[in-house]
Amino acid sequence: MLIEAISQITDPNLHFVIAGPDDGFLLELKELIKEKNLGKRVTLWHGCFGEERAQLFKASDIFVYPSYSEGFSLGILEAASVGLPLVITTKCYFDQVRKYNAGVIVEPNPESIAKGILQLARDPKKRNQAADNSKRLIKENYSIEIVGEQLLSIYRKSMSEKA
């Protein structure tokens, strides 16, 4: 789906890095990139962890998560925590992106994803605002203090129910 979206974006100044584990699709991705003649605009980076992942996030302008189905994405949280504006699909079920104006939520199809990427890529002011809002989303909802307090609350509640 992402390769199809990228093939619809004609701006030669945009370069895309697709990062993540192989999961058996690497060969298929390479073939699709070749078929769509996107070799100069797409880099595949599999097995990206730790400091390497942090450096990749720092070098990025936008984080795109084109999911068909998602429970809870740590990748989205990681990207938001470093201030990346987000392009995610409605199937990510992460409405805080809309609430905080931390990026755009699009339908899970190539046309919508391409449109979402271009919205942020073409508008530096919107992109910078979404980046700031991504950090705020994390600070206000997922900081260690907030998550720790939520866990303590759950623990206390479960202990009081047992008493």
Image (tube, grey):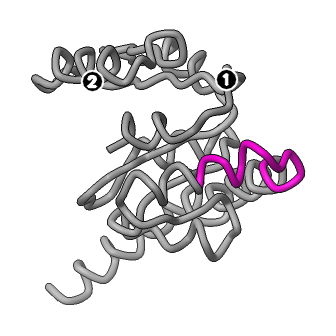
Pointer 1 residue: 12
Amino acid type, label 2: Leu
Q: Which mark is residue 53?
A: none
Of 66 and 137, the residue lying toward us: 66
Question: 20 left or right of 111?
Answer: left
Q: Is residue 58 magenta?
A: no
Q: Secondary structure at mark 2?
A: helix
Q: Residue 104's spot in the image, x, y percent?
A: 60, 62
Q: Residue 105's spot in the image, x, y percent?
A: 52, 65
Identify the magenta region. 116-127
Q: Quadrant of the C terminus?
A: bottom left
Q: Residue at x 37, y 40 (%)?
A: 4
Q: Secondary structure at mark 1?
A: loop
Amino acid type, label 1: Pro
Pointer 2 residue: 32
Give whichever of discs 2 and 1 has the lower sequence position. Answer: 1
